Image: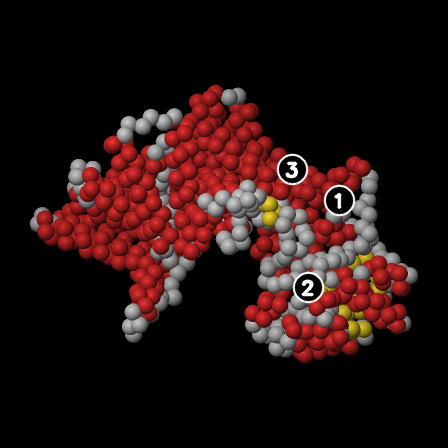
């Protein structure tokens, strides 16, 4: 079920009302059933995969806790990780690996090909697998007690607001909340609703409108777009993906908040970062901290020699790229971030360069945008072509319009002029809204009718100017 | 404090609903008055604003391919082309019903068909063209037949329809109010036709070459609906002409079962004593100069077809 669908508009109030009407002891059951229904709305059969991981990790957690022998504990943990990663590999990476293996075999003129599987990636697989893994790791480390209540543990993996696209929660933050009795609090409820509204606005009004222009360039990369067009499309995409994903997170956090649950913050104005490392402390926080806690630190973190540190960083970023998808473009995207971060560390250690704060933000944003080209392009050939066209300074570099073959009016990033200009206006609107996020006190000091006018404007923008044709959130595919 | 907050929330929602319904009412009234584009055509039919002596219905093949100007000049009658792009028979069935229910003056109805006119359709094309008139039962029922859930939601769920609209809907509303306040009616010199001045498109040959052979499905329920429309026109004392519009020969060769389609339309015409004109066998279908793509005539082709059609209509007693 999509957050931006009519089905969810009915599902959410029904579940929330029932949640508060039911006695506390039955609430976990309601939420679990609701989460199953929510997930099965996409493809019912894939719930079996979830059940499998839940059962294995539930027992793994209990056995790890019971087992005193260190070696046995480790084996149990590895078994749990093996099953989780195994499921990920089969459903997400098998075809990619088989395809590349077959290419190698073809190149070597060797017989024997691995068959491809005709499977669809279960929605949000990487998210709930990582959340499940964090539970067994935390139990193994002794930071979390094993959950004895099977239903509550299942809910930890399946809690519908964050089931398909995070935030990837830690057991210490969320598990105990399912045991606590939640009372209806009007102010918390209102705050949750506002967050949902804000998330929907970002997704439906900003992200999906930008997607129309972005798709017209990135889905037809070889149509000789000028450098400026590719730059604008890439900036559009950077805002699109942020609004799409952070919009989802806001709706997820808002939905949980309405019922009294606190989910972790997933984004913190990442495009105002002054460096790549700061960017990663503000972008998809739940994933970057996951990598930090469970991969980067076990690899030695920053308490190692510089060369090893750089290698650790590169490994983490490449894994992060692979996490996003079985495509070489994602690996390059991750590796680029790794290289930029290593580059900045080397520069900072050798030279004490002082640059204006705003120039730093602009420079970081430009680097991030460059990497988005690889993230968004459909394959490496297209990514390379688009990337190079930015640096192809020919006489048509600043040409924005494209003449129509059939004598129709020119288009600008695939849009008529007036629609292009309106879309362009989204960029300053987006940055103003981002700045306003830091001025919450000012916003709440405004008279209520002005705040209401802003809320009404957002709601009616959703209804009248929202784009509902593309629908799906980008991060669902991961 | 809690009571106050709940009261505030309820008041907020009430104001929201009132403003939403008011805006919806204002926009819908504007769209209903619009005369431009396809929405304008639907409005003309539903509001009985236009009662030509000869009315043409069909999809894009009819819209670009039949010139009311030529028919009008040749037959000395006023003619209007109500054809709507992307709208095969099953989608415009409700519009014809509505037209027949209210219309008094029209003498002849031309149904401009393509090969796919009797094929099933599971998605409504551009529902926003019909939204201002979705409370009209005839319009609604024809949409309901194609995509029941969408049609139902658009009619009964307040504001849901805006999920299906784009800026065109608001431009139509603006056009409606502009005409209402200025009192100016749209002067449509093409009388509903959308003549296309383009030549054969460059990439069309490649498209034809790459296209696969396929069967055209004939849906018996649609055939029955077509039959009942023909009976209704007869009952209303209107003469009807069914025209199978030209298709470029290279393309029609890709359709493996043209004969059953021709036969189905022919039988429908014969059973209802209606004239059937098959333009797919004309020599013009072999010449690219009369088409701008495989299924659509350009102005030159439309002019020839309209003259032939005028001659045929002249012979109707």
The answer to which quarter of the image holds residue B277 is bottom right
What coloring was used for the rendering? Answer: secondary structure
Residue shown at 40% from the left, 52% from the top: A477
Mark 1 vs mark 3: give the one in front. 1
Give the distance between the C-alpha atoms of the residues marked 1 and 2, in whole angstroms: 36 Å
Query: Which residue is labeled 2 in the image?
Result: B200
Residue shown at 53% from the left, 41% from the top: A205
- Report if the CB atoms under discs 3 and 2 are less than 8 Å apart: no
Query: Which residue is labeled 1 in the image?
Result: B33
Front residue of A304/B172: it is: A304
- Please say whether residue B225 is visible from this viewpoint: no
Mark 1 vs mark 2: give the one in front. 2
Front residue of B228/A392: it is: A392
Mark 1 and mark 3 lie on one chain; the one further toward the N terminus is 3
Residue shown at 61% from the left, 37% from the top: B20
Q: Quadrant of the N terminus of chain B?
A: top left
Horizontally, residue A159 falls left or right of residue A403, namely left
Give the distance between the C-alpha atoms of the residues marked 1 and 3, in whole angstroms: 16 Å
Above or below, A191 against A83 in this view is above
Marked residue chain, label 3: B
Q: Residues within 10 Å of mark 1 (few under 14, many from 20)?
A: many
Looking at the rendered structure, the secondary structure element under dot 2 is loop
Q: Quadrant of the C terminus of chain B?
A: bottom right
Looking at the rendered structure, the secondary structure element under dot 1 is helix
The answer to whether tags 1 and 3 share a subunit is yes
- Please say whether residue B174 is visible from this viewpoint: yes
Above or below, B84 against A25 in this view is below
Query: Which residue is labeled 3 in the image?
Result: B23
């Amino acid at each position: 079920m999509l957050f931006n669908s009519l089905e969810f508009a009915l599902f959410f109030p029904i579940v929330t009302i029932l949640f508060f009407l039911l006695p506390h002891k039955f609430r976990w059951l309601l939420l679990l059933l609701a989460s199953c229904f929510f997930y099965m709305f996409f493809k019912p059969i894939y719930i079996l995969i979830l059940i499998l991981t839940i059962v294995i990790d539930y027992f793994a957690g209990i056995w790890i806790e019971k087992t005193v022998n260190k070696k046995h504990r480790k084996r149990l943990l590895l078994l749990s990780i093996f099953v989780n990663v195994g499921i990920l590999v089969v459903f997400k990476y098998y075809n990619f690996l088989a395809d590349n293996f077959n290419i190698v075999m073809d190149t070597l003129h060797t017989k024997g090909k691995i068959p491809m599987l005709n499977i669809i990636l279960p929605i949000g697989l990487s998210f709930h697998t990582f959340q499940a893994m964090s539970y067994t790791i935390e139990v193994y480390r002794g930071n979390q007690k094993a959950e004895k209540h099977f239903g509550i543990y299942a809910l930890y993996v399946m809690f519908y607001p964050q089931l398909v696209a995070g935030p990837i929660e830690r057991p210490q933050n969320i598990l105990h909340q399912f045991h606590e009795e939640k009372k209806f609090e009007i102010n918390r409820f209102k705050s949750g609703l506002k967050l949902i509204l804000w998330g929907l606005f970002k997704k439906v009004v900003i992200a999906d409108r930008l997607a129309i222009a972005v798709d017209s360039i990135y889905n037809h990369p070889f149509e000789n777009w000028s450098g400026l067009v590719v730059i604008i499309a890439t900036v559009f995409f950077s805002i699109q993906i942020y609004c799409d994903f952070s919009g989802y997170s806001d709706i997820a956090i808002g939905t949980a908040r309405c019922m009294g649950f606190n989910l972790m913050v997933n984004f913190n104005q990442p495009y105002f970062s002054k460096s790549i490392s700061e960017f990663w402390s503000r972008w998809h926080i739940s994933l970057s901290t996951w990598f930090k806690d469970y991969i980067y630190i076990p690899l030695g973190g920053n308490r190692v020699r510089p060369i090893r540190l750089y290698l650790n960083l590169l490994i983490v970023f490449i894994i992060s790229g692979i996490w996003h998808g079985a495509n070489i473009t994602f690996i390059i995207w991750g590796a680029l971030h790794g290289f930029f971060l290593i580059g900045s560390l080397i520069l900072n250690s050798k030279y004490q360069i002082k640059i204006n704060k705003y120039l730093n933000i602009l420079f970081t944003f430009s680097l991030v945008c460059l990497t988005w080209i690889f993230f968004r392009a459909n394959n490496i050939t297209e990514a390379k072509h688009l990337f190079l066209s930015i640096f192809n300074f020919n006489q048509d570099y600043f040409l924005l319009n494209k003449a129509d073959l059939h004598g129709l009016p020119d288009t600008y990033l695939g849009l008529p002029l007036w629609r292009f200009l309106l879309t362009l206006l989204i960029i300053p609107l987006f940055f103003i809204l981002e700045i306003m996020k830091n001025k919450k006190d000012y916003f709440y000091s405004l008279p209520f009718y002005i705040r209401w006018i802003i809320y009404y404007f957002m709601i009616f923008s959703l209804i009248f100017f929202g784009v509902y044709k593309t629908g799906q959130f980008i991060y669902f595919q991961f | 404090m809690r009571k106050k907050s709940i009261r505030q929330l309820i008041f907020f929602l009430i104001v929201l609903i009132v403003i939403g319904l008011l805006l919806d009412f204002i926009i819908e009234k504007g769209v209903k008055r619009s005369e431009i584009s396809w929405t304008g055509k639907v409005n003309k039919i539903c509001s009985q604003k236009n009662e030509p002596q000869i009315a043409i219905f069909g999809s894009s093949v009819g819209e670009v391919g039949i010139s009311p100007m030529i028919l009008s000049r040749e037959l000395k009658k006023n003619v209007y082309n109500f054809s709507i792009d992307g709208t095969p028979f099953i989608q415009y069935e409700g519009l014809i019903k509505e037209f027949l229910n209210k219309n008094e003056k029209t003498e002849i109805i031309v149904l401009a068909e393509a090969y796919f006119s009797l094929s099933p359709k599971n998605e409504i094309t551009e529902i926003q063209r019909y939204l201002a008139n979705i409370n009209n039962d005839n319009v609604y029922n024809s949409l309901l037949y194609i995509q029941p859930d969408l049609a139902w939601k658009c009619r009964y769920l307040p504001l849901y329809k805006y999920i299906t609209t784009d800026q065109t809907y608001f431009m139509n509303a603006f056009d409606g109010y502009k005409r209402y306040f200025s009192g100016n009616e749209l002067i449509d010199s093409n009388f509903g036709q959308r003549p296309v001045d383009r030549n054969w498109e460059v990439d069309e040959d490649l498209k034809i070459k790459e296209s696969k052979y396929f069967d055209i499905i004939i849906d018996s329920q649609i055939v029955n609906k077509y039959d009942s429309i023909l009976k209704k026109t007869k009952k209303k004392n209107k003469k009807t002409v069914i025209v199978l519009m030209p298709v470029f020969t290279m393309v029609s060769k890709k359709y493996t079962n043209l004969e059953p389609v021709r036969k189905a339309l022919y039988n429908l015409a014969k059973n209802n004593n209606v004239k059937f004109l098959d333009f797919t066998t004309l020599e013009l279908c072999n010449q690219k100069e009369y088409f701008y793509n495989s299924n659509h005539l350009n102005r030159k082709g439309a002019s020839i077809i309209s003259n032939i059609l005028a001659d045929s209509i002249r012979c109707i007693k």
